[in-house]
Amino acid sequence: MNNDQIRFDFNNVMLKKTGKRHLVSRDEIAALEPAVRDFHAQLQAEKAAGKLGFADLPDRTDAADACRKAAEARKGGFENFVVLGIGGSALGPIAVHNAIHNPHYNLDERLRNGWPRFFVEDNIDPDRMHALISLLDVRKTLFNVISKSGGTAETMAQFLIFRQMLRDQLGDAFAKNMIVTTDASNGLMREIVAAEGYESFAIPGNVGGRFSELTPVGLFPAAMTGINVANLLAGAKAMAQRCSVAELWKNPAYMDAVLHFIADTQKGKHISVMMPYSSRLRDIADWYRQLWAESLGKKHDLDGKVVNVGQTPVKALGVTDQHSQVQLYVEGPNDKVFTFIAVGKYSCDVTIPKAFDSKEGASYLGGHTLGELFDAERVGTQVAITQAGRPNLTITIPEVNEHHLGGLLYLFELQTAMAGKLYRINAFDQPGVEAGKRAAYALMGRAGYEKDRRQIESLTKKADDEFVIC
Amino acid sequence: MNNDQIRFDFNNVMLKKTGKRHLVSRDEIAALEPAVRDFHAQLQAEKAAGKLGFADLPDRTDAADACRKAAEARKGGFENFVVLGIGGSALGPIAVHNAIHNPHYNLDERLRNGWPRFFVEDNIDPDRMHALISLLDVRKTLFNVISKSGGTAETMAQFLIFRQMLRDQLGDAFAKNMIVTTDASNGLMREIVAAEGYESFAIPGNVGGRFSELTPVGLFPAAMTGINVANLLAGAKAMAQRCSVAELWKNPAYMDAVLHFIADTQKGKHISVMMPYSSRLRDIADWYRQLWAESLGKKHDLDGKVVNVGQTPVKALGVTDQHSQVQLYVEGPNDKVFTFIAVGKYSCDVTIPKAFDSKEGASYLGGHTLGELFDAERVGTQVAITQAGRPNLTITIPEVNEHHLGGLLYLFELQTAMAGKLYRINAFDQPGVEAGKRAAYALMGRAGYEKDRRQIESLTKKADDEFVIC
């Protein structure tokens, strides 16, 4: 066993001597092995042909260097750093920030070591936006507009608002408070960069939003708070090497894909719960939620047949959600597969003092550490869920640092790519988002969407008062 | 139509002229009307017999007064206010705080109006706990230990840690920095209150943790940041009155329960997504997640028959999760029913400046407000989800304030109680949490759990290395 690398334990998914029909047999896995070997060869060929962009990223140390240098040049120059982005432009930066930094980073300047406060504005709620505007001195704020397509309505609206504020307050010098991360050559934001002279980073054309955390989308925001982005990439690279083998039984990304695929399509586990036992990794589960849902939730397969597939990802947090969701997980429908994420070594621990010797409900805790209690609760939950016949996996990350975080991100990205092959869908598009976008454009009066608007108005007019209680 | 109260619109659940089998017909609702009338009578009888504790809370203005006075007496006396609690002792306080206060409340003292910073420590992650300990000057911190049972391991561990720190730093006066909210007469925390002389609040014996937000569990933390707790109760009371009628077609709580029940048990919608279009209401969806999951996720029905029921609640946030989950919602399996929460009037709005006249991808936004864009995106998503044949409801809250928040909480509580009747399960217990708790006690070496420990050790020993990749 190697304690220095991420450990993938799938004992509690496997049918061993228990005979429980909800668990997976060796034969069920073996039946997919030939397909996995084929898909592995396909993925390798796609990578070689430059069509699997995310797989190239661990080697792009030039991007990490550029982000680090750009960040260092700005250190001390700004009080605040604000990401304007949503979806794939926000979830990764949030997840990495919260994994590496103290939860009170913004509250206590001793934790920042000279780096700016960190905000990700991933919504356009007017109340929330107004609160941010009131808080910030924009002259002392660096904005990082992140949009792969360059046309995301929410990000464009935010950009227009802060651009105007910067122009009003800084005049001609306003562009220095804005850095744009967008497609290398296409899209509206790329045009605006050229017209207004912003510094910019490029997202490779073959990397989609939800696979972009290891591009400057994630690397620059991380670097702007002092996170070691070279180590993020090095960890991803180590994981890429581990997962470069065709053999399913040695490849955690492929095995995780296969187990989830069997669970969903053969065992009725239509829900995939990710439950880190680490507050620091909470938002990794949120990032994974987009990756898994948007990549695999598809109407059509590769032949154009209607399939409506896709497991629903759910995030939970240990131990917090033991007191919210575990009742359902243990006693409700057996329709879930669980991924626990455990941490081998915490960066700090706290000893629980001995007290109330005569009160058994308190005294058993004294002398233990919080880490021991945390681990005991995780194991207790795993045991309860296993005894209830519900399949569960455990991924153990030796400690929460940049290296292992990069490894974890890459593991899930490759797993998702393999899952796309198993489901026989395109894991890299998102056609289902178009209808809602068109409708929003239409309602905002964008030229070219007049017909959509009439259609929506006729649809929304059909609302009957008999189906309203007010 | 009454624009001053919460509006419940279920047009997009109803089969009208579309003939879609995923939607609900009037006949399917009508078939449940006699049962709902019976269940209404049962709930009324239970209330009269003092067995439906949460339904009495809107009238407990004495509790609100006591919390307000206790808070006012402490205003200015503390820099920090920390809730030590988990599950039902944390989700409500977090949800109300984030709904009423500015998201930067802790960061900017101008937003606090003399009230202390607000923290809810709802986990025992050692890294997170260490971070909080490092941040706080405990001498200037008021801790509110909240535990209905008084024996929750996580809360007890936190209490022991901060109690010791307070004793070390404040000596005999340490008790003034601690307030305990627990059962009126039972449990270990109640004994400790008596022994150590803490001030305390009582949770009525007939109100369980997840239904306790309108007791001092929620009222005191709210009052400690200046939230008008009387208005919370008044709003709940107004909703209780609206929902006191037996007629399903006039009672939003009952109709919401019936529609979710039909969706789950007759239409295969085993997932209930709550998607507020309001950052302020995000954590209401988290609070609801516990309420729905823990109340309805049950192995046995009232006759003791094994049923394994329970819809899985999922929280999403508009517009943020349009860029993360909506691809799956529109194109994936049709296994979800959606509840959108809309806000009638934002407390602030921001106008998007006109710019880039010649660039259509930016110019259509100029002159609109963010609120208009936010609403257009919500309607766009609703239209896309409806056109894809997926049932969805919209609850519109006139504005986010204490009154309507109280109403919303009560609406969901009563809906859950009615849903419990429809599923024929006990909505007020949580037997499935016991196994995990016992396991954790055993692993911590608590007396009386030696047998459990041996059992767990034999179970966890069974792990085969062949099912581990590391």
Image: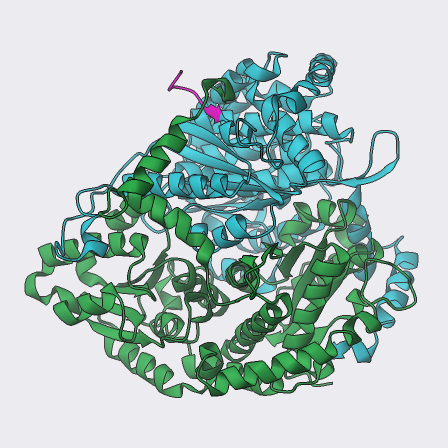
Chain colours: A green, B cyan
* Tally of marks: 0
Relative to B389, B398 lies left or right: left
Please say whether residue B324 is visible from this viewpoint. Answer: yes
Name of the residue lying farthest toward the left: A172
In this rendering, is residue A304 above or below A453? below
Q: In which quarter of the image is the N terminus of chain B?
A: top left
Say which of B56 and A122 sits in front. A122
Relative to B99, B198 lies left or right: right
Q: Quadrant of the C terminus of chain B?
A: bottom right
Q: Is residue A158 magenta?
A: no
Identified at 56% across, 25% down, the residue is: B410
Relative to A288, A90 lies left or right: left
The percent coordinates of residue A465 (x first, y second) are: 45, 19
Task: Name the chief secondary structure element in magenta.
Answer: loop
In this rendering, is residue B391 above or below A318? above
In this rendering, is residue A178 above or below B79? below
The percent coordinates of residue B155 (x first, y second) are: 65, 48
Identified at 77% across, 58% down, the residue is: A267
- Range of magenta residues: B1-8
The percent coordinates of residue A191 (x first, y second) are: 19, 68
